[in-house]
Amino acid sequence: MRRIVINNGVLCQIARFNFLVSCLRFDSKDTRENRRLITKFAPKVWDILIKNCSETLYKPSSYLTIDEQLDGFRGRCLFKMYIPSKPNKYGVKIIMMCDNATKYMISALPYCGKGTVPTNEPAANYFVERLISSVKGSNRNITMNNWFTSVPLTQKLLAD
């Protein structure tokens, strides 16, 4: 095991870290095929993350924002995207709702390709309705860009 001394005397165990990272796995080979029929994403880890970020542990302010983010990733992934206009051109696209005041993520959904959105519904409507379900009826202002905005969606949200 290799040790490196940092300026303040703290020892870093790089070899141990590399070993732990190489052993880290979020799925089981036994259930992998069954999960692929349901979703391409690792649901347990994602669900834990979203549950910890949700409104149960954090009370968002009155102003929220919905937007997309491309998290840079060049590894093997079934739903990796290429968007040439982004700084990281390859990555995983995540649509998220964040608090304007603190920039805290309240809810998020990964875009896993064509099977992510039901066929009878526009993608923007699907993502907006799923993201705002936790704050629905709380009289919060939600800002989103033109990709998420449509007249039918606005009428439906105002009616609810």
Image: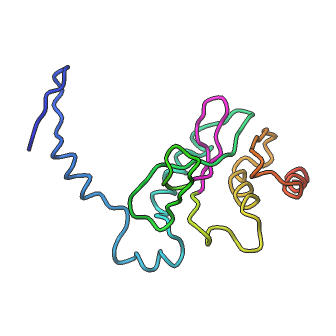
- Residue 150 vs residue 57: left or right? right
Q: Residue 126 appears at what percent x and percent y?
A: 72, 61
The residue sitting at 51% across, 56% down in the picture is 92
Which of these two is toward me, 42 or 6?
6
The residue sitting at 66% across, 29% down in the picture is 101
Count of picture labels: 0
The residue sitting at the front extreme is 84
> Does the magenta stretch mainly form a helix, a strand or a loop?
strand
The C terminus is located in which quarter? bottom right
The residue sitting at 77% across, 68% down in the picture is 121
Q: Is residue 24 above or below residue 53?
A: below
> Is residue 104 within the magenta segment?
yes
Find the magenta span and give its range.
94-109
> Is residue 152 within the magenta segment?
no
The residue sitting at the left extreme is 1
- Residue 11 vs residue 125: left or right? left
- Residue 49 vs residue 137: left or right? left
Q: Residue 76 appears at what percent x and percent y?
A: 39, 64
- Quadrant of the image occupied by residue 97: top right
Q: Residue 157 appears at what percent x and percent y?
A: 85, 52
The residue sitting at 32% across, 61% down in the picture is 25
The N terminus is located in which quarter? top left
Q: Is residue 88 above or below residue 92?
A: above
- Quadrant of the image occupied by residue 5: top left
